[in-house]
Image (cartoon, rainbow, N blue to C red):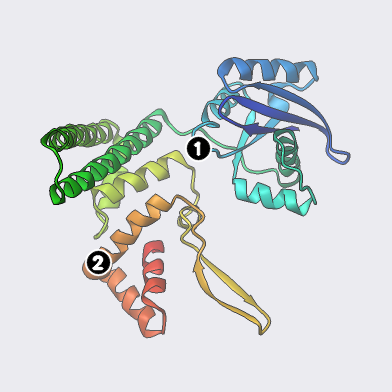
Amino acid sequence: MFFIGIDVSKAKLDCSLLLEVARSKRRAKTVANSKAGITDLLAWCTKQQVANHELHAILEGTGVYHEQAASALTEAGVTVSIVNPAQVKDFGRSLGIRTKTDGVDSLILARYGALLNPRPWQPPSREARILQALLSRREAIAQDLQRERNRLEKADATETCQLIHQSLTDSIAFLETQLAKLQQDIDDHIQQHPGLKDDRELLTSIPAVGPQVGNHLLSIMHNHRFQSAEQLAAYLGLVPVERQSGTSILGRPRLSKAGPARIRAILFMAAVVGTRHNPHLKDLYQRLQERGKTKMSALGAVMRK
């Protein structure tokens, strides 16, 4: 198996094909971040006498810019792994590498793959990708709507001309219509796919997990492959991290906060509701406080549960 590290940016892919692991012997190639660029990259690898099925590509998760490359490589028969950028950064430091360029980053990715052999990435289903896109768009519209409402509140509190007031009112009405339509589109999409529908019903059967919390968790669970509840909790940054050493460092445990902050914020509000209306979570919350845990620490445990 040959490992190729791919440093992803919006416009291009900087690639390092590792030919000899011990000496870090490599070949470098830069292609466009497009389907045509992936075709050029695979043709170049063939010239290096590396077949698609012998290739293991290592990419960092960089928002949406890595998705097209990862999907195209997987369809071509290449093994693809999506790795955590923070872990790769720490790996580079452990190698004593301080230089920061796209070419060096791609080499670090290739060496990371050769040493740790991360698990292969499996592309999510089309319905899961659509659900994720719909939820992202709904979140963006909701944020725009809140900003416009804040502006209208300020306009009402000051001497603002009627034209600006009318503009804000029209904008709010438009955004409210868009938000309602997107919510209907999300509900219709879930209803049309039995896998999504059944899982959402299971999620929302938990007291304190409402439609919005259920939809966001549903999207995450269908866009990633988790083997256990512990893996999901770790992805969301809900596992405790301890900081103790000898007698001088006695830090309190805290949440790792390694995953999407927005989902943690949603789960936090669900945890608050759960401590009041979910008997199991209420008992857990009270039991931890009786053991001396702070309210925030207990809420963190409720979020993880």
In this picture, residue 207 sits left or right of residue 302: left
In this picture, residue 125 sits left or right of residue 1: left
Q: Residue at x 73, y 37 (%)?
A: 110
Image: 296 above or below 185: below
Q: Residue at x 71, y 29 (%)?
A: 15
Picture disc at residue 38 = none
- Residue 47 image-quadrant placement: top right
Q: Position of residue 294 (x, y in %)?
A: 40, 78
In this picture, residue 234 sits left or right of residue 156: right
Q: Position of residue 87 (x, y in %)?
A: 64, 50
- Within-10-Å neighbours for mark 1: few <14, some 14–19, many 20+: few
**Mark closer to the chain start, 1 or 2:** 1
Q: Residue at x 24, y 33 (%)?
A: 182
Element assignment for label 1: loop
Q: Residue at x 46, y 57 (%)?
A: 233
Q: Position of residue 48 (x, y in %)?
A: 80, 20
Residue type of the residue flagged with mark 1: Gly
Q: Position of residue 252 (x, y in %)?
A: 52, 76
CB of mark 1 within 8 Å of CB of mark 2?
Answer: no
Element assignment for label 2: loop
In which quadrant will I find the C terminus? bottom left
- Within-10-Å neighbours for mark 2: few <14, some 14–19, many 20+: some
Picture disc at residue 278 = 2
Residue 155 visible in the shown view? yes
Distance of label 1 from label 2 (alpha carbons): 35 Å
Between 34 and 270, the one lying in front of the other is: 34
Image: 154 above or below 123: below
Residue type of the residue flagged with mark 2: Asn
The residue tagged 1 is: 63
Image: 178 above or below 93: above
